[in-house]
Image (tube, rainbow, N blue to C red):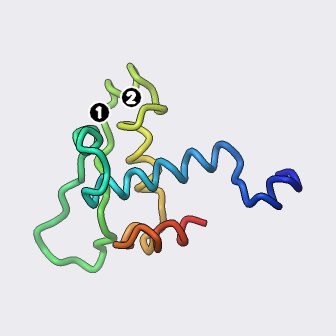
Amino acid sequence: ITPLLLVLHWLPVKFRICHKIAEISFKTIHNMGPAFLSNLINIKQCSRYNLRSFVGVILQDPTAKFKCTLGDRSFTAAAPKIWNGLPDYIRKENDLICLRDSLR
């Protein structure tokens, strides 16, 4: 990371993309984003029992056929991968500002 990026508090491009996808996923899960995005991701159904292992909302991975044809760069494939890779305490956030602070 260059000194200029440090002074400007900018992330490298790869991390910025992951940050934005995580933020858009949060907005979509909590019905704050555009309606068409909610059709692109599916929330994985959790157990009907209240388990200690429950770690918040988990997104369902798309089928293998979908990943092969469109690649991992589409929102439908990238959002579950990035969202499910976040630590539990970040996925449990209910406030967008707190999520942004946690992602930094």
Q: Is residue 101 left or right of residue 40?
A: right
Q: Is residue 40 above or below residue 92?
A: above
Across and down, in percent, residue 59 comes to 31, 52
User: Residue farthest to the right?
Assistant: 3
Q: Secondary structure at mark 2?
A: helix
Q: Which residue is mark 2?
A: 67
Residue at the location (23% across, 53% down)?
44
User: Residue flagged by tag 2: what amino acid is it?
Assistant: Lys
Front residue of this view, candidates 97 and 55: 97
Count neighbours of disc 1 (C-alpha within 10 A) and say few if under 14, some if 14 to 19, many if 20 or more: few
Front residue of this view, candidates 20 and 46: 20
Count neighbours of disc 2 (C-alpha within 10 A) and say few if under 14, some if 14 to 19, many if 20 or more: some
Residue at the location (31% across, 37% down)?
62
Q: Is residue 47 above or below residue 80?
A: below
Q: Is residue 66 above or below residue 61?
A: above
Q: Where's the C terminus, which quadrant? A: bottom right
Q: Secondary structure at mark 1?
A: loop
Q: Pointer 2 and pointer 1: residues touching (CB < 8 Å)?
A: yes
Q: Quadrant of residue 40?
A: top left
Q: Which residue is mark 1?
A: 63
Residue at the location (71% across, 48% down)?
12
